[in-house]
Image (cartoon, grey):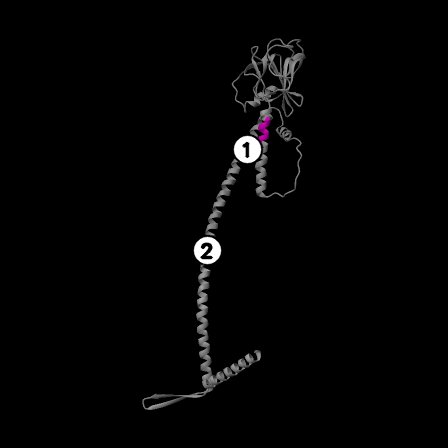
C-alpha cells in the first residue's frame, strides 16, 4: 500500500513540475505587442528578460500589497491596544496619585496629633515632676522604683522610624502613668481641713523642758475630736500607744513613704487595713507627751523624717482643698 501511494505522489509531483515548467515557458516566451494608430502599425517586441522583470515586479508588488494589508490591520490593532493600556495606566496613575495625596494628608494629621499628644503628655509629666521635686523627692528615683526589678528579655529587633515613634509614645505614656501613680501615693495634703501650725519641722525649743531639740514633724492645732484623714492611700502598719506619740497611726504609702499621726484621741483603723486618700483614721486628741490637744504629723522617706510642710505646699498645685491655715 505504501509503495502504491508513493508511486501516485511521485507521478503527481512530476505532473506539477511539468505544468509549472510549461507555465513559466509560456510566460517567458518572447512576444510582440502590436499597436495600431490610424494608418500606422507599431510593433513592440518583449524579450524574455523584460517579461521576467515585469513578472517579478508584479509578484513583488502583489506580495507587498498583501503584506501591507495584513500588517497595517495588525498594526492598527496594536495601536488601539496600546492606547487602551496607556489610558488604563493613566487612570491607575490618577487614582494612585489621589491615594498618595490622601495618605500624605493622613500622615501629616497623624504626625500633628502625635506631636500635640506628646507635648501635652510631656507638659503633664513636667508638672507632676515639679510637684514631686517641690516635696523634696527625686522623681526619677521614684519612677525607677515604680518599675521595680521586673525580669526582661527577648529577641533583638532593630528599630525602624515607625517603631521608634511607637516606643517614644509608649515610653512617655508609661512615665506619665508612673508619675500619676506616684503622686497619688505621696502625702500632698494636710490630714485635716481646718488647723493652725503651732510648731514647725526642725530645730525648736521643747515646749515642756525648754531645751532645744529637733522636731521631726509639724504640730497642727484644732478642736478635740476633729476628724483626722489619711493624706494618701496605703496600708496601716502600726496603731496604738507609742512612747511620746501617745495614740498613733502609721501608714505605708509605698515608694518608701510613710506618715505618722500622733496624740490621737481615738484610733479608727487597725493594723493591716487598707485606707483610701482622705479616709478617716482617727480623731484629734492630747494623748502622750503634750501641752494641749493637737496632731503631731510626720512624713518619712526611706525611714528618714521629711518636712511635712513641703509636701503640703507642693500639693497645692495638684489638689484644691478648702482649708484655712494659720501660722507658718
Percent x, y of residue 138 = 63, 27
Span shown in magenta: 176-182
In-image side of 31 versus 209 (left or right):
left
User: Which of the numbered marks, if any, corresponds to residue 88?
Assistant: 2
Percent x, y of residue 158 = 63, 43
Q: Say few, some or many: other residues with alpha carbon within 10 Å of mark 2 (under 14 / 14 to 19 / 20 or more).
A: few
Q: Would residue 328 be visible to someone looking at this image? A: no
Image quadrant holding the N terminus, namely bottom right
Percent x, y of residue 41 = 35, 90
**Which of the two discs, 2 and 1, sits closer to the camera?**
2
Q: Quadrant of residue 263?
A: top right
Percent x, y of residue 95 = 46, 50
In-image side of 148 versus 107 (left or right):
right
* Residue marked by disc 1: 121
What main secondary structure does the magenta stretch of the protein show? helix
Q: Who's the residue at 59% across and 29% down the image? A: 179
Mark 2 touching mark 1, by CB under 8 A? no
Is 205 magenta? The answer is: no
Q: Quadrant of residue 258?
A: top right
Residue 193 in the image: above or below residue 26: above
Check disc 1 and report its element: helix, strand or loop: helix
Q: CA distance from mark 2 to mark 1?
A: 48 Å
Q: Who's the residue at 46% across and 48% down the image? A: 98
Q: Quadrant of residue 327?
A: top right
User: Which of the numbered marks, if any, corresponds to residue 1?
Assistant: none
Front-lying residue, 75 or 305: 75
Front-lying residue, 2 or 283: 2
Q: Earlier in the sequence, mark 2 or mark 1?
A: 2
Amino acid at each position: 500500500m505504501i509503495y502504491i501511494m508513493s508511486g501516485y505522489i511521485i507521478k503527481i509531483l512530476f505532473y506539477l513540475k511539468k505544468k509549472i515548467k510549461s507555465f513559466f515557458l509560456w510566460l517567458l516566451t518572447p512576444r510582440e505587442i502590436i499597436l495600431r494608430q490610424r494608418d500606422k502599425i507599431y510593433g513592440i517586441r518583449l524579450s524574455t528578460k523584460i517579461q521576467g522583470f515585469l513578472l517579478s515586479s508584479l509578484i513583488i508588488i502583489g506580495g507587498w500589497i498583501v503584506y501591507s494589508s495584513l500588517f497595517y490591520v495588525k498594526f492598527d490593532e496594536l495601536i488601539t491596544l496600546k492606547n487602551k493600556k496607556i489610558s488604563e495606566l493613566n487612570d491607575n496613575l490618577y487614582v494612585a496619585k489621589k491615594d498618595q495625596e490622601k495618605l500624605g494628608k493622613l500622615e501629616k494629621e497623624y504626625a500633628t496629633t502625635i506631636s500635640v499628644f506628646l507635648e501635652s503628655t510631656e507638659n503633664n509629666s513636667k508638672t507632676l515632676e515639679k510637684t514631686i521635686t517641690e516635696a523634696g523627692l527625686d522623681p526619677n528615683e521614684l519612677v525607677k522604683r515604680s518599675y521595680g526589678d521586673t525580669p526582661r528579655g527577648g529577641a533583638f529587633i532593630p528599630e525602624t522610624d515607625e517603631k521608634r515613634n511607637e516606643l517614644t509614645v509608649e515610653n512617655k505614656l508609661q512615665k506619665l502613668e508612673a508619675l500619676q501613680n506616684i503622686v497619688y501615693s505621696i502625702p500632698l495634703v494636710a490630714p485635716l481641713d481646718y488647723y493652725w501650725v503651732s510648731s514647725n519641722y526642725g530645730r525648736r525649743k521643747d515646749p515642756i523642758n525648754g531645751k532645744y531639740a529637733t522636731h521631726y514633724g509639724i504640730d497642727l492645732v484644732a478642736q478635740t475630736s476633729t476628724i483626722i484623714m489619711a493624706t494618701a492611700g496605703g496600708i496601716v502598719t502600726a496603731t496604738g500607744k507609742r512612747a511620746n506619740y501617745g495614740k498613733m497611726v502609721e501608714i505605708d504609702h509605698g515608694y518608701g513613704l510613710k506618715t505618722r499621726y500622733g496624740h490621737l484621741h481615738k484610733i479608727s483603723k487597725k493594723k493591716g487595713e487598707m485606707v483610701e486618700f482622705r479616709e478617716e483614721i482617727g480623731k484629734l486628741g492630747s494623748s502622750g507627751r503634750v501641752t494641749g490637744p493637737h496632731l503631731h504629723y510626720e512624713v518619712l522617706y526611706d525611714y528618714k523624717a521629711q518636712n511635712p510642710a513641703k509636701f503640703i505646699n507642693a500639693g497645692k498645685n495638684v489638689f484644691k482643698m478648702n482649708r484655712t491655715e494659720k501660722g507658718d
